[in-house]
Every structure is written in structure tokens, then in C-alpha cells.
Amino acid sequence: MSVRARAVDILVNDLRREWRSRFAVNAVLVFVSAALFVSAFLLKATEIGLFAQSGLLWLILLFAGLSSLSRSFVAEADRHTDHLLRWHADPLAVFFGKFGFNLLFTLGFASVTVFLYAVLLRIGPESPGILALALFLGCLGFNAVATLMAALVSQTTQRHSLFGVIALPLLVPLLLIAGRLTHIGFMGASNTTWMNDAMALLGYAGAMITASALLFETIWEA
């Protein structure tokens, strides 16, 4: 079976497993609901500037993702089926299958979160295309890092806390650029300078996907 076909099989299997357990969905729903409530009613995020609101949005997305994506390889590790996966699937197939699932999952909850955030804070995107681009490219880079780090910590006992500690330093540049591009999406683009941030996000995502794919085999088979 080709790498692409095996990656699709892993992606579909993870989708089915999540549909049955809904563990990640429930974890994200709880976190996002609490974060949106605190932002809108306790922190009074409606009164802060649009740039700060964009940064706060990405902090919510970041920690929502960290609360769930650390489990990318936990099911196999807990059931001791990770060895079977190593034997029957090419490391690249495993990486892109897990990466594809994480990306679909993240884009799903991120889209819902952005919609609810905009409604609660009463902010409408002046440039929805730029906002969608920031969301997609941000999730692309985020999941490249998250998938690799999840594989790295899957065999440890403190995987959840360790996952955030080692992933956060790599995600700081992404947060800064994605927050700035999201701000432009909400405020509206008066010129083409937003393209610099979009290209930076695309470059970050491309570099992270390439590096993660190259490093994954070493980590996965260690």
C-alpha cells in the first residue's frame, strides 16, 4: 500500500475513533466555552483594542489545541498497538495521517471558536478572506509542531504537561505573526502589506512541516 493510501487509512481510523470517544471534542468544548465566557464577561475583552483581541483569540486557540492534541499518539501507546503501527506503516504515512487528522480537527474547532468570539465581542471581519487565510496558515503551522511533539512525548508518563513545555517555544513566532494577520482580517486591509505576514506564516508552516516530516522517523522509531 502506498504512503498516501496508508496515511488516509490512519486519518480515517482516527476520525472514527474520535467520533466514538469524543474525548478531544469534549475537552476542547469545555476549554473554549470557559475561555470565551471569561474573555467576554470577566476580562471585558470588548473594551480592549482590536489588536489585543486578536492576540487573545490566538491564545484561546493555542491552549485549546494543547489541551487535546497531545493525545495524538496516546491511543496506540495506551493499548500497546504502537508497535503494530510501526511495523505496518511507513513513518511518513503515520506522520501525515496524524497531521491530517489534527489539521481537520483544529480547523473545525478554530472556525467555531472564531465565530463565537466575533459574536460575543461584537467584532465583524472587514476582510474575511484574510482572516480565513490567517486561520488556515496558523493551524497548518501549529499542527506541524503539535504532531511531532505529540509523537515525542507519547511514551512519557507526564505527556500532557511536557507537551506544552516543549511545543510553546516553537509556537511563539507563529502566534505573533498569526495574531498580526488576524488583526488585519478584523480591521480590514488598507494596502498589501498583509501579504508579508501571510508569506511569513506560509514559510513557517512549510519549514515546520518539512522539518517534522524529516525528524519524525527518528523519533517514531526510537
Image (tube, rainbow, N blue to C red):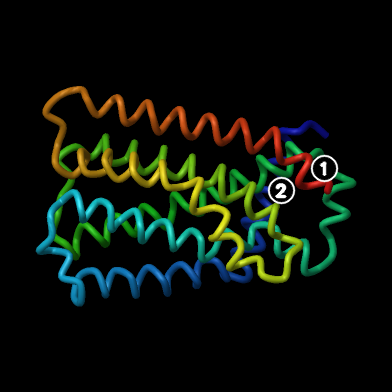
Residue at x 55%, y 66% (from the top left corner): 24
Q: In the picture provided, is 145 more to the left or to the right than 43?
A: right
Front-lying residue, 112 or 31: 31
Three-letter code, disc 1: Ala
Q: Nearer the viewer, mark 2 or mark 1?
A: 1
Residue at x 66%, y 40% (from the top left corner): 96
Question: Which label number is shown at residue 10?
Answer: 2
Front-lying residue, 51 or 31: 51
Three-letter code, disc 2: Ile
As drawn, 101 above or below 92? below
- Count of picture labels: 2
Task: State yes or no: discs 2 and 1 in contact (Cβ < 8 Å).
Answer: yes
Front-lying residue, 19 or 118: 118
Residue at x 20%, y 22% (from the top left corner): 192
Which badge, 2 or 1, comes first in the chain's sequence?
A: 2
Residue labelled with disc 1: 89
Q: Residue furthest top?
A: 192
Q: In the picture provided, is 43 more to the left or to the right than 87?
A: left
Q: Secondary structure at mark 1?
A: loop
As drawn, 71 above or below 86? below
Residue 88: horizontal and vertical position, in percent?
87, 45
Question: Which label number is shown at residue 58?
Answer: none
Residue 67: horizontal and vertical position, in percent?
51, 66
Tell me the distance, in whole angstroms, between the alpha carbons under discs 2 and 1. 9 Å
Residue 135: horizontal and vertical position, in percent?
36, 43
Q: Quadrant of residue 43?
A: bottom left
As drawn, 196 above or below 156? above
Crowdedness near tag 2: few (<14), some (14–19) or many (≥20) residues, C-alpha within 10 Å: many
Crowdedness near tag 1: few (<14), some (14–19) or many (≥20) residues, C-alpha within 10 Å: some
Q: Quadrant of residue 212?
A: top right
Q: Secondary structure at mark 2?
A: helix
